[in-house]
Amino acid sequence: MLLLMCGMSKLLIANWKMNPVLPSEAVSLANKIGASAKKHRNVSIGIAPSFVHIPLLHKPKTLWLGAQDVFWENPENGGAFTGEVSLQMLKNLGVSFVIVGHSERRKNLGETDEVINKKLKMLVGSNFFNILCVGEPLSIRSKGFAAAKKYVANQLKIDLKGVNNFHKLGVVAYEPIWAIGTGKSDNPELASEMAEYIKKLTGADVLYGGSVNAKNAESFLEKPLIAGALVGGASLNSEEFSKIIEIASKL
Ligand code: PGA
């Protein structure tokens, strides 16, 4: 995955969140996105379904299979961690990347930067590719862009504390919280400026996420400093997501 990232191609990640509800719908969506990926091999495309659907989508040929979270402990022989899923379990199902620190987990489950740091240490220590999500709430952004930068820098400082060589195994997804699922995407110029700032701080490539759709995808993806997109809502509609793939393939 990382080798693909090093080329000119853009990386598109479909974050399905707690969707779709039916297993058959997840299989069908993956097949449709997979078919579109087959036509545009110059784009790196990953899907992150719910844990329960991962075994049904075992190693789709043209897609990277990912998970939306992982536990920070990874004992080889399992362990007493009720409700959790280990990296080893995911690897056994053909998963090749993990999303960490999504704002919905930070908000709904109280996932702290310290918890995210533990997960990243485990993932990078296991040589596993990951996507770290950061981004400011509206209350911060309304104080200005400088305040947003400071907020994100602070998240990164804690999330990546003691995580060596993160940039070799991870990308950062900049997702302003107020832009997620609201239809109010960020200004592409400012998203690009934030991507440049994050790259300077971490050395890692940066994706943009937050209400990316077929209409606005080009305005983000055409920015050289934006390596790709993390797409939620629009990735649940195969036609819409295929359009985004097509746009990325032409850049
Ligand atoms: P959205 O979600 O595209 O629906 O705004 C993005 C995300 O939460 O990763």
Image: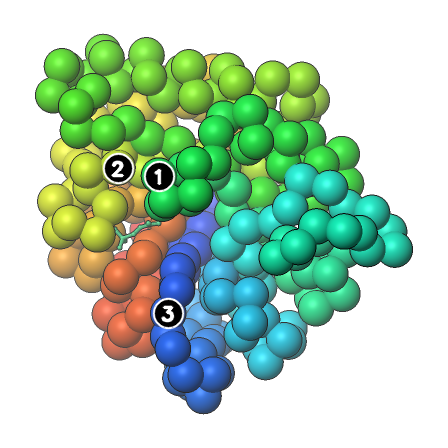
Question: Which residue is the site of mark 1?
Answer: 107
Nearer the viewer's eye, disc 3 or disc 1? 1
Q: Looking at mark 1, is its residue's CB closer than 8 Å to ligand 1? A: no
Please provide percent x and percent y for residue 245: 34, 63
State if disc 1 and disc 2 touch (CB < 8 Å): yes
Distance from disc 2 to disc 1, alpha carbons, whole Å, reads 10 Å
Element type at mark 1: helix
Res. 177 mark? 2
Spatial separation of the CA atoms under disc 2 and disc 3:
20 Å
Give the image's coloring scheme: rainbow
Residue 117's quadrant in the figure? top right
For the residue carrying disc 1, how many other residues have a C-alpha within 10 Å: few (<14), some (14-19), or many (20+)?
few
* Residue type of the residue flagged with mark 1: Lys
Residue behind mark 3: 19
Q: Earlier in the sequence, mark 2 or mark 1?
A: 1
Answer with the quarter of the image where residue 210 lies: top left
Q: Position of residue 114 (x, y in %)?
A: 55, 25
Name which residue lies at 49% across and 66% down. 50
Task: Categorize mark 3 by other alpha carbons within 10 Å: few (<14), some (14-19), many (20+).
Answer: some
